[in-house]
Amino acid sequence: MSAREEVGERATVRPREASPPSPAPKEPAPQTKGPAPEAPSPRLLVVEDEEAIAEGLAVNFRHKGYRVDLAADGEGALQRVAAGRYDLIVLDVRLPGVDGFEVCRRLRAAGDLTPVLMLTAASQPDDIVYGLKLGADDYVTKPFDLAELLARAEGLLRRVAWSSAGAGGEEGRFRFGDFWVDFKTYEAKTRQGVVELSRKELAVMRLFAERPRQAISRRELLAEVWELPHHPNTRVVDNVIVSLRRAFEESSWRPRHIHSVRGVGYRFEP
Ligand code: CA
């Protein structure tokens, strides 16, 4: 174990932060629109060798109604995954024996596309790139902010719910109307046939997929997609919307999916 890791991980052990359940758990929002099939609660696997962190995460996830299993090392994680299906794996990269990178690599090599949220060391930016290359879906750096980690986990779970909600069942495909977007290959079925979306188009669609029926402001889109929260010019957002509407709307004046919200931004209706 390196000195760096010791520092990074020790700094994360903050029982006051990790043990109480996150504040104000939201009641499950009553579904007023569309069919709301009774979804089973998400099943998570937390892979972390530091007990305090693992337990803290488990407490918080369970408080949200998720089912949580724990694994303290890479071997244990692979056994768990082989034995049952998970909706999300929270995977620390620094583990004794088989490390988190190797766990992720083996899963993907075996064709397992279970979403992976990696916990990486903030001091090692290369870890993030490496993790994403190996097929991790998102990451949080250690020491992490609990609220951020929970939000990212939720984001990944929503993404899965959306991709499996559509017919067909191809993993990673988000379906709406007559169209689909494949977040893994960048391809989309559009009015012009199957085309490749740009990175920004894909990122905007991902945000829409994660937050259907909600108004999303231009500023938020700038912050999330362009990582420019203070950018003075929101026209870049509108330009991407124009091309997405060309792809997915019969008429940009009477859009079916990508609606304008006056004075705010946009709202996506699947
Ligand atoms: Ca660790």
Image (cartoon, rainbow, N blue to C red):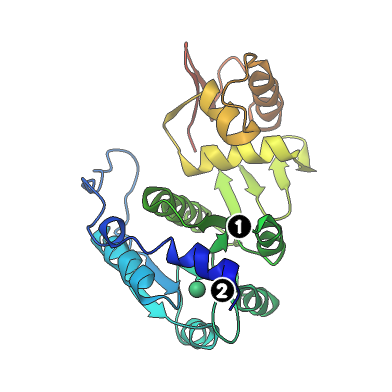
| Left or right of residue 158: residue 31 | left
Where is residue 242 drawn, in percent x and y? Answer: 68, 21
Mark 2 residue's CB less than 8 Å from ligand 1: yes
Q: Quadrant of the N terminus?
A: bottom right
Give the residue pinned by disc 2.
Answer: 94
Which quadrant would residue 111 be assigned to in this image? bottom right
Give the number of callouts. Answer: 2
Q: Residue at x 62, y 19 (%)?
A: 231
| Left or right of residue 201: residue 61 | left
Give the camera-side residue of 181 and 142.
142
Image height check: is 1 above or below 36?
Answer: below
Residue 42 visible within the image? yes
Mark 1 residue's CB less than 8 Å from ligand 1: no
Spatial CA span between label 2 and label 1 = 27 Å
* SS at badge 2: loop
Where is residue 6 drawn, in percent x and y? Answer: 51, 70
Where is residue 105 drawn, in percent x and y? Answer: 67, 75
| Left or right of residue 267: residue 111 | right
Which quadrant would residue 245 be assigned to in this image? top right
Residue at the far front in the pictured view: 3
Question: Which of the two labelled residues, at mark 2 and mark 1, occupies the earlier sequence position?
Answer: 2
Q: Which amino acid, by three-letter code, is at mark 1? A: Gly
| Left or right of residue 115: residue 60 | left
Residue 93 visible within the image? no
Q: Which amino acid, by three-letter code, is at mark 2? A: Arg
Residue at the far top in the pictured view: 263
Give the residue pinned by disc 1.
Answer: 172
Q: Residue at x 67, y 30 (%)?
A: 244
Q: Residues within 10 Å of mark 1 (few under 14, many from 20)?
A: some
Where is residue 102 drawn, in percent x and y? Answer: 65, 78
Q: Residues within 10 Å of mark 2 (few under 14, many from 20)?
A: many
